[in-house]
């Protein structure tokens, strides 16, 4: 029986890199994450290139983008709904309409170039699903 340490090497030893230091994870401020995510969303920019430039893996940057998208949909990130500014415009008709002929009021929401009319009585889950679908359309 022979000892493997005493056998001749069939190939030259490879270079080893020894890392010294704390070896802990880097921490990124919320502002830095938001800036990098915004940079990765610019038109014609490669997410992988942005990740490399900042010393990240593409998977980490995609996770940050997903997290930012969830926060934007849910509001402050604590599950509360997000609010947007509302613009009220006067009615297009100049003639007063008889009271009984007025249609039920509806809310119009413009998102991603689409106009969504929400009739009275529609539940919030359906509205949220429609708005998410409108935001993600190509």
Image (cartoon, rainbow, N blue to C red):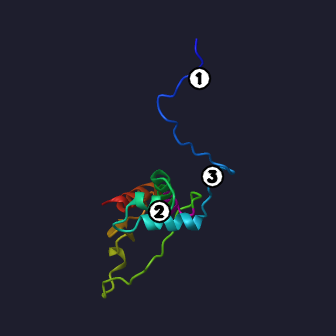
* Magenta: main secondary structure: helix
Query: For the residues marked 1 and 3, what is the alpha-carbon distance in whole angstroms?
Result: 40 Å
Residue 107: where, in percent of width, then height? 40, 70
Query: Hey, which quadrant is residue 32 in on the image?
Result: bottom right
Q: Nearer the viewer, residue 62 or 98?
A: 62
Left or right side of 105 for 75: right
Q: Earlier in the sequence, mark 1 or mark 3?
A: 1
Is 131 covered by the magenta stretch?
A: no
Q: Quadrant of residue 17?
A: top right
Quick one: label 3 or label 2, which is nearer the N terminus? 3
- Identify the residue at image location x=31%, y=88%: 94
Residue drawn 43% across the image and 79% down it:
87
Of residues 37 and 74, the one nearer the viewer is 37
Q: Give the spatial CA distance, label 3 vs label 2.
A: 18 Å
Which quarter of the figure has residue 106? bottom left
| Residues at marks 1 and 2, CA–CA distance in whole angstroms | 46 Å
- Would residue 73 be counted in the magenta stretch? yes
Residue mark closest to the camera, 1 vs 3 = 1
Q: On residue 6, which mark appears?
A: 1
Q: Which residue is mark 2?
A: 53
């Amino acid at each position: 029986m022979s000892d493997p340490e005493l056998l001749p090497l069939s190939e030259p030893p490879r270079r080893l890199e020894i890392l010294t230091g704390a070896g802990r994870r880097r921490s990124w401020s919320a502002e830095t994450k938001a800036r990098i995510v915004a940079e990765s969303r610019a038109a014609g920019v490669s997410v992988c290139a942005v990740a490399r430039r900042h010393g990240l893996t593409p998977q980490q940057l995609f996770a940050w983008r997903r997290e930012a998208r969830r926060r934007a949909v849910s509001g402050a990130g604590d599950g509360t709904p997000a609010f947007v500014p509302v613009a009220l415009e006067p009615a297009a008709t100049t003639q007063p309409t008889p009271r009984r002929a007025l249609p039920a009021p509806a809310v119009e929401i413009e998102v991603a170039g689409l106009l969504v009319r929400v009739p009275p009585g529609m539940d919030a889950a359906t509205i949220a699903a429609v708005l998410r679908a409108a935001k993600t359309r190509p």
